[in-house]
């Protein structure tokens, strides 16, 4: 009888049975390639796209070689982040149920006293961050002499965070014949020197290296102005309505502000802060896994390596710094053959980054526009398309800087209406001597009805400059522009200033405009 599934990889029957209980029956390509040499005790450098089962690819060989009766640390798994460490511990604990193998996590941010107490229980496997493990070694609370296997998961991130020096310091305290395994979706060229320095004839396992992202992923991006990104994200979340999604930004310091803005926009979101306590981060991850909120806002480091099956979408509120970071971000969805969608929101100046990622990763990264609750392909030959988030759908004439608080087209339309005999509406700061020609006259209660009728009935041409004062009392010649009497306007302003707040009997009487000018001068004297 031929062996199939994990049995064909010579995995112990108890673990094969446990995997079946967890719903895992067939190994993935990276597991088929990496498990056999790892079981033989060889050093392994494994590379595979995110979400392909790399954790089991090293966890199964490690468990196979653990001696349960021996109460000492035999395997060390180093990780870049707390969340990834807790996830790996959970996986190992599920596999080692009722086997007598104890797993202990040693991650930064947790109480070191409690970790020291738990080390007294003699775990066989330790999962931790390089800094905390090295700290416990210096305190002589953790011995490295019995360690036979060392795994560095997400080794590129460990290297990028500057923790590789701590890893090498730990390797110096271990046996020379210990086994080493590196796992990651991406490998920077600088890591090759570390591999050559510490590994012995490693077996390189690369599963479809040209396909660095999942084939079940859909890659999209939308163009938006920086100030409109939050609103664009809100509209996209409403449009796609993901079961759960991760939103990535570049700076940890921006998480609080972004969470506040997204909550104000009505979205169900929480942040994964890199500088918060372990308990707070654990509660946030536990609540997210339980589906208590829809969006998890995080940085690249915080979300590295997380396996969240319920995540259907990834949104990049800030573009990744390079193609490798893009691979790890979008790898939070579309895992193990499931469908997923990766959506990036970029400014017009960041547009070239998407083209760069598409060429570098060999993916179909499509630009889309959003309008009226639907997603469309942009029209060919156009830049910012009407309806696209952040795009200005007005024509160039409308996009000119407004001079009076209104767009250029609105001013032009108002001018045409004024030429037809109507005043431009909405301009409260100035009075145009146009249309009916009586806007200013209506403010002067002292004007005679005859003069008002004469002024209103006279046809007036539209004048270019704004009238800075009310129209004069003199008759308006047909076809001539109305020119206000500046001196009279000043006198009226002065009279109104003096009359303000004075009793009626003390108020200055308005001049009669129906008597000759000489009589008016004599009365003033």
Image (cartoon, helix red, strand yellow):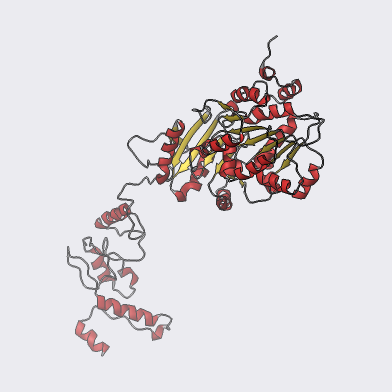
Q: Does residue 510 appear to the left or right of 65 in the view shown?
A: left
* Position of 258 relative to 304 (above/below): below
Camera-side residue of 186 and 341: 186
Camera-side residue of 231 and 454: 231
Q: Does residue 384 appear to the left or right of 287 in the view shown?
A: left
Camera-side residue of 149 and 505: 149
Camera-side residue of 508 and 339: 339
- What is the x, y in percent for residue 276? 65, 51
- What is the x, y in percent for residue 272? 62, 46
- Residue occupying the far front of the picture: 176
- What is the x, y in percent for residue 19? 71, 24
- Residue occupying the far top of the picture: 1
Q: Quadrant of residue 195?
A: top right
Q: Quadrant of residue 462?
A: bottom left
- What is the x, y in percent for residue 172? 66, 41
Quadrant for the N terminus in the image: top right
Quadrant for the C terminus in the image: bottom left
Question: Residue visible at 27% across and 80% down?
Answer: 512
Question: Residue visible at 76% across and 22% down?
Answer: 14
Q: Quadrant of residue 177?
A: top right
């Amino acid at each position: 009888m031929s062996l199939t599934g994990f049995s064909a990889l010579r995995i112990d029957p108890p673990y094969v049975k446990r995997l079946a209980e967890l719903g895992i029956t067939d190994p993935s390509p990276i597991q088929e390639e990496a498990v056999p040499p790892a079981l033989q005790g060889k050093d392994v450098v494994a590379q595979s796209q995110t979400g392909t089962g790399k954790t089991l690819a090293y966890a199964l060989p490690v468990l196979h070689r653990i001696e349960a009766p021996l109460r000492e640390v035999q395997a060390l798994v180093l990780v870049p982040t707390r969340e990834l460490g807790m996830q790996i511990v959970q996986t190992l604990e599920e596999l080692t149920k009722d086997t007598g193998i104890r797993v202990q996590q040693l991650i930064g941010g947790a109480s070191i006293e409690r970790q020291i107490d738990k080390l007294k229980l003699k775990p066989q496997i330790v999962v931790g961050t390089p800094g905390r493990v090295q700290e416990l070694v210096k305190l002589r609370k953790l011995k490295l002499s019995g360690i036979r296997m060392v795994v560095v998961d997400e080794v590129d991130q460990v290297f990028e965070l500057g923790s590789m020096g701590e890893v090498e310091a730990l390797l110096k305290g271990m046996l020379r014949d210990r086994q080493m395994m590196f796992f990651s979706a991406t490998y920077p060229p600088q890591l090759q020197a570390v591999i050559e320095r510490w590994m012995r004839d490693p077996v390189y396992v690369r599963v479809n290296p040209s396909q660095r992202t999942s084939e079940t992923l859909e890659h999209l991006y939308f163009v938006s102005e920086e100030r409109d990104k939050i609103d664009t994200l809100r509209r996209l979340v409403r449009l796609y309505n993901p079961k759960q999604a991760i939103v990535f930004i570049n700076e940890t310091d921006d998480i609080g502000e972004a969470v506040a803005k997204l909550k104000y926009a009505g979205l169900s979101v929480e942040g994964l802060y890199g500088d918060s306590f372990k308990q707070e981060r654990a509660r946030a991850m536990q609540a997210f896994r339980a589906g208590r909120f829809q969006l998890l806002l995080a940085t690249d480091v915080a979300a590295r390596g997380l396996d969240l099956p319920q995540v259907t979408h990834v949104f990049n509120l800030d573009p990744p710094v390079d193609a490798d970071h893009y691979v790890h971000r979008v790898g939070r969805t579309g895992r193990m053959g499931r469908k997923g969608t990766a959506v990036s929101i970029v400014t017009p100046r960041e547009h070239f980054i998407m083209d760069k990622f598409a060429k570098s990763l060999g993916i179909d990264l499509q630009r889309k526009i959003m309008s009226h609750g639907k997603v469309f392909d942009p029209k060919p030959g156009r830049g910012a398309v009407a309806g696209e988030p952040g795009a200005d759908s007005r024509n160039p004439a409308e996009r000119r800087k407004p001079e009076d608080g209104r767009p250029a087209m609105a001013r032009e339309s108002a001018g045409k209406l004024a030429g037809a005999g109507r005043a431009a509406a909405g301009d409260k700061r100035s009075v145009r001597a146009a249309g009916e020609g009586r806007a200013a006259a209506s403010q002067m209660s002292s004007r005679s009805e005859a003069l008002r009728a004469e002024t209103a009935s006279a046809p007036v041409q539209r004048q270019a400059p704004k009238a800075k004062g009310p129209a004069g009392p003199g008759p308006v010649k047909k076809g001539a522009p109305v020119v206000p009497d500046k001196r009279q306007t000043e006198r009226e302003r002065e009279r109104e200033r003096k009359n303000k707040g004075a009793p009626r009997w003390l108020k200055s009487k308005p001049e009669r405009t129906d008597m000759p000018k000489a009589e008016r001068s004599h009365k003033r004297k």
